C-alpha cells in the first residue's frame, strides 16, 4: 500500500479520536477519569466493550488460526458467554453494593491490605503484558505499511503509538475511552464486514452460497472431543468460562467501564447485550478466516508460514485498496481500543490501590494520576520492544498463556473470599500467590508423563485458581 495513503488514513483516524477526546474531557476531574461520574448510558458501554474485547489479537490472529484449528476457538467463546452471564448475576451486584472504584478494594475489605495489594499487583502485571502484546500487533502493521518505507526504526513506531494513546486519554480517562471505543468498534466491525463482502464478490458468492460453502468446508468444524487434545470441548468451554470470570469479572479494565453505568440494573443490561454481540462478532471473524483460506486455495496463493500474517498479507497484497485501508483502520482500532482502556485502568489501579488517591484532595489526586499515567506509558513501550525480540509463537496463544498463569491468583482470591467466610493470615497471601502459578507451570510442563498424555490448554487457569484456593485454605482460620 502507498505509504502516503497510509499516512493520511492514520492521521485522519487519530485526528478524529483527538476531537472526540477534546469534546468528552472538557471540565473533567479525577472522578471523570476513574468512573465517568457514573453517568454512562448502558447501551453505549455495551457497544464500546466490543471494541475493547475484540483486540488486535482477535482481529489478526483468530482468522489466521482457523487454518490450524478450524472453528474450535468458538468452543472457548461459548464458555466466554456463560462467564459473562455469571459476572452479571453474581459479581456486578457485589461491586455496586460496595460502591467501589477499583474492584480489588473488595479483597482489602475481605482479607486485609496484603491481599488487596496482591490482587492489584497481579492485575497490573497481567494487564501490562496483555496490552503490550495487543499493541505490538498494531505497531507491527504500522511498521509494515508506513514506517518501513521511510526506514524508521520499530522503536520509534512504538513510541509514537503510545504517545497518541497518552494524548487522548490523559484527561478524560474512562469517559473518553467509552466514546472513542464506541467509534473504534464501528471501524473494526466494518472492516471485517467489508472484507467478507469483497471476498464473496470475488468468489461469486451470495449470502446463501457463502453460508453453504463455509459450512461444508472442514475449516468450519467446531467441536473436538479427544480428551488429550488442547482443543477438547470441555477444556475450551470451561477454560473460556473461567477466563471470562477473571479477565472480565475480576479485571479492573472491564469492570471500570461497567461501574460507570448509573445503576446495577443498567450495568446488567450492558453485560447481557454486550455478551451476545461479542459472540456474533467473533463468529464473523471465524467465518472471515475460513473465507481467507478458501480464497487463497482457489487462487493458488502461497500463504505466509505464520498464521498471524495471513490476513494482513492478503489485505495488503491481494484484496484491493479498499480492503487494505479497511484492514489498516480495523487493526489500529482493535489494538488501540484495548490498549487505551488498559492504560486507563492501570493508572486507576495504581492511583487508588497503592497510593490511596481516592481519599486525597483533588490537586493531589491529579498529580498521582498523571505520574501513574506516564509510568505505564513508558512500561508499555519497554515490554513491546522486549516482546519484539523474543516472541516465537502465535500472539493469540501467548496472550492467554500469560493470562492463565497471572490471573490464577486473582481467581483464587475472589472465589475464596466469595464462597468462604474464613479469614486468612494476610501477610502470607503474596507467597501463596507466587507459589500457585509456579506449581501450575511445573504440572503443565510434565502433564504428558504424569497424567497419561494429558496436555493443558486454557484450563490451566482453573488449576492455578484451585491451587491458590488450597493455599489460602491452609493459611486460613475461622
Image (cartoon, rainbow, N blue to C red):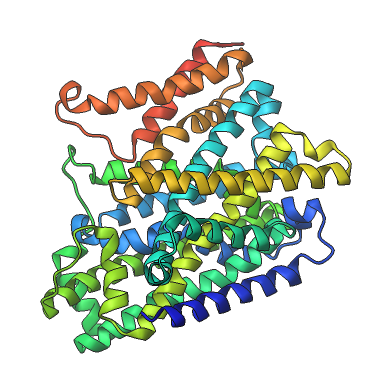
Residue at (50% x, 44% y) in the render: 382
**Is the residue 229 above or below the residue 268 in the image?**
above
Q: Residue lying furthest front in this view?
A: 151
The image quarter in which residue 414 lies? top right
User: Measured from the top left, where is residue 207 in percent x and y?
Assistant: 28, 84
Residue at (66% x, 71% y) in the render: 18
User: Measured from the top left, where is residue 413 in percent x and y?
Assistant: 55, 27
Q: How many marks?
A: 0
Residue at (44% x, 60% y) in the render: 139
Residue at (38% x, 49% y) in the render: 388
User: Measured from the top left, where is residue 346 in percent x and y?
Assistant: 62, 44
Work out whether residue 160 can be spotted: yes
In the displayed structure, does residue 268 sit left or right of residue 388?
right
Work out whether residue 65 can be spotted: no
Q: Quadrant of the N terminus?
A: bottom left
In the displayed structure, does residue 227 sit left or right of residue 249?
left
The image quarter in which residue 99 lies? top right
In the displayed structure, does residue 462 sit left or right of residue 7?
left
Amino acid at each position: 500500500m502507498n505509504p502516503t495513503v497510509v499516512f493520511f488514513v492514520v492521521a485522519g483516524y487519530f485526528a478524529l479520536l483527538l476531537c472526540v477526546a477534546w469534546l468528552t474531557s472538557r471540565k473533567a476531574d479525577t472522578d471523570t477519569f476513574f468512573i465517568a461520574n457514573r453517568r454512562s448510558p448502558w447501551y453505549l458501554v455495551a457497544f464500546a466493550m466490543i471494541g475493547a474485547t475484540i483486540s488486535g489479537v482477535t482481529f489478526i490472529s483468530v482468522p489466521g488460526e482457523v487454518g490450524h484449528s478450524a472453528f474450535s476457538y468458538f468452543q472457548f467463546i461459548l464458555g466466554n458467554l456463560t462467564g459473562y452471564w455469571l459476572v452479571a448475576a453474581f459479581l456486578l451486584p457485589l461491586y455496586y453494593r460496595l460502591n467501589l472504584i477499583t474492584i480489588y478494594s473488595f479483597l482489602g475489605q475481605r482479607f486485609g491490605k496484603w491481599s488487596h495489594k496482591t490482587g492489584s499487583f497481579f492485575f497490573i502485571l497481567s494487564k501490562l503484558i496483555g496490552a503490550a502484546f495487543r499493541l505490538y500487533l498494531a505497531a507491527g502493521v504500522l511498521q509494515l505499511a508506513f514506517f518501513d518505507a521511510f526506514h524508521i526504526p520499530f522503536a520509534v513506531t512504538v513510541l509514537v503509538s503510545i504517545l497518541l494513546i497518552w494524548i487522548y486519554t490523559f484527561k478524560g480517562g474512562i469517559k473518553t475511552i467509552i466514546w472513542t471505543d464506541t467509534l473504534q468498534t464501528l471501524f473494526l466491525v466494518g472492516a471485517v464486514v467489508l472484507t467478507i463482502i469483497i471476498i464473496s464478490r470475488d468468489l461469486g458468492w451470495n449470502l446463501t452460497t457463502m453460508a453453504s460453502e463455509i459450512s461444508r468446508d472442514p475449516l468450519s468444524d467446531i467441536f473436538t472431543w479427544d480428551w488429550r487434545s488442547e482443543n477438547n470441548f470441555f477444556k475450551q468451554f470451561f477454560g473460556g468460562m473461567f477466563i471470562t470470570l477473571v479477565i472480565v469479572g475480576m479485571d479492573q479494565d472491564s469492570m471500570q467501564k461497567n461501574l460507570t453505568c448509573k445503576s446495577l440494573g443498567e450495568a446488567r443490561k450492558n453485560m447481557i447485550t454486550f455478551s451476545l454481540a461479542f459472540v456474533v462478532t467473533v463468529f464473523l471473524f471465524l467465518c472471515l478466516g475460513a473465507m481467507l483460506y478458501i480464497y487463497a486455495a482457489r487462487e493458488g496463493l502461497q500463504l505466509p508460514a505464520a498464521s498471524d500474517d495471513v490476513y494482513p498479507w492478503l489485505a495488503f497484497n491481494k484484496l484491493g485498496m479498499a480492503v487494505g485501508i479497511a484492514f489498516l483502520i480495523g487493526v489500529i482500532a482493535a489494538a488501540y481500543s484495548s490498549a487505551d482502556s488498559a492504560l486507563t485502568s492501570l493508572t486507576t489501579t495504581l492511583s487508588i490501590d497503592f497510593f490511596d488517591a481516592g481519599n486525597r484532595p483533588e490537586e493531589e489526586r491529579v498529580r498521582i494520576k498523571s505520574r501513574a499515567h506516564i509510568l505505564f506509558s513508558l512500561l508499555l513501550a519497554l515490554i513491546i520492544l522486549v516482546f519484539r525480540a523474543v516472541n516465537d509463537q502465535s500472539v493469540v496463544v501467548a496472550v492467554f498463556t500469560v493470562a492463565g498463569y497471572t490471573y490464577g491468583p486473582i481467581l483464587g482470591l475472589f472465589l475464596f473470599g466469595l464462597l468462604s467466610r474464613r479469614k486468612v493470615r494476610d501477610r502470607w497471601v503474596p507467597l501463596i500467590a507466587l507459589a500457585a502459578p509456579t506449581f501450575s507451570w511445573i504440572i503443565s510442563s510434565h502433564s504428558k508423563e504424569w497424567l497419561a498424555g494429558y496436555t493443558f490448554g486454557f484450563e490451566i487457569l482453573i488449576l492455578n485458581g484451585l491451587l491458590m484456593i488450597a493455599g489460602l485454605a491452609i493459611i486460613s482460620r475461622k
